[in-house]
C-alpha cells in the first residue's frame, strides 16, 4: 500500500473533484480506501494522472483505480494514466486494476472512444472507462 500523499478512509462515500469533474466511490462494504494524490505529490515530474485508489480488504489490496479528471483531451489523459501505471507497476502489477477518465467533453460513444478503450486494454491488460463530468463506482 502506498503510504505517501495518501488518505485512508472506510467512509460510505469517497469523492474527488476538480474543475467540475467528479469521481465518487460508494463504499457499501465499508472497505478501507487508500486515496493517493498522484499529481503534484506522489509523482511531481513528468506525466501522471490525478489520483489512484487502493481498495483494501483484510489488509490486502483487492482493487486499484487510476483516475484522471480531464478537460477534453482524452488522448492526453490516456498518456497520463499509462505513465502512472508504469510508475506503480511494481506495487500494483498483479492486482485487479481499472482506469477511469472523467472529462468535460467526450467524443460520442462511437469509433473514437472504442478504439481508445481497446488500445488501452491491449497495452495495459485492464479496462478503461470514459465518462462525462461524473463517474460513480460502487464497491
Image (cartoon, rainbow, N blue to C red):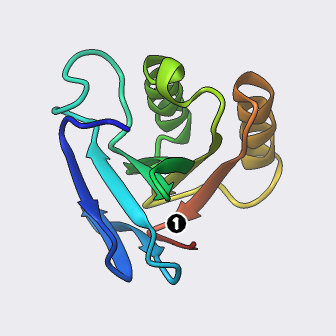
18 vs 129, left or right, is: left
Is 5 above or below relative to 123?
below
User: Taking the image as drawn, is residue 77 in sight?
Assistant: yes
Where in the figure is residue 94, as x and y percent of width and height?
Answer: 66, 30
Quadrant location, the N terminus = top left
99 vs 34, left or right, is: right
Task: Name the residue: 61% across, 55% down.
Answer: 130
Where in the figure is residue 16, as x and y percent of width and height?
Answer: 29, 64
Where in the figure is residue 82, as x and y percent of width and height?
Answer: 53, 26
Front-lying residue, 65 or 10? 10
Kind of element beneath mark 1: strand
9 vs 61, left or right, is: left
Task: Name the residue: 39% across, 63% down.
Answer: 32
Based on the displayed image, in which of its 4 quarters is residue 48 positioned? top left
Is 93 above or below relative to 138?
above
Is 92 above or below relative to 86?
below
Q: From the image, tell me which residue sits under label 1.
A: 132
Task: Name the residue: 38% across, 60% down.
Answer: 33
Is 124 above or below relative to 32?
above
Front-lying residue, 23 or 103? 23
Based on the displayed image, in which of its 4 quarters is residue 117 positioned? top right
Where in the figure is residue 10, as x and y percent of width and height?
Answer: 34, 72
Q: How many labels does the image show?
A: 1
User: Taking the image as drawn, is residue 64 in sight?
Assistant: no
Crowd band around label 1 with a 10 angstrom C-alpha radius: few (<14), some (14–19), many (20+): some
Quadrant location, the C terminus = bottom right
Amino acid at each position: 500500500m502506498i503510504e505517501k500523499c495518501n488518505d485512508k478512509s472506510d467512509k460510505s462515500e469517497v469523492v474527488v473533484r476538480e474543475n467540475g469533474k467528479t469521481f465518487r466511490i460508494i463504499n457499501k462494504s465499508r472497505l478501507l480506501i487508500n486515496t493517493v494524490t498522484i499529481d503534484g505529490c506522489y509523482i511531481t515530474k513528468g506525466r501522471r494522472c490525478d489520483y489512484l485508489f487502493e481498495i483494501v480488504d483484510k489488509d490486502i489490496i483487492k482493487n486499484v483505480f487510476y483516475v484522471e479528471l480531464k478537460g477534453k483531451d482524452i488522448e492526453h489523459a490516456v498518456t497520463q494514466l499509462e505513465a502512472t501505471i508504469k510508475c506503480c507497476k511494481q506495487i500494483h502489477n498483479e492486482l485487479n486494476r481499472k482506469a477511469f477518465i472523467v472529462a468535460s467533453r467526450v467524443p460520442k460513444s462511437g469509433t473514437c472512444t472504442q478504439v481508445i478503450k481497446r488500445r488501452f486494454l491491449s497495452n495495459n491488460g485492464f479496462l478503461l472507462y470514459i465518462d462525462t463530468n461524473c463517474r460513480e463506482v460502487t464497491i
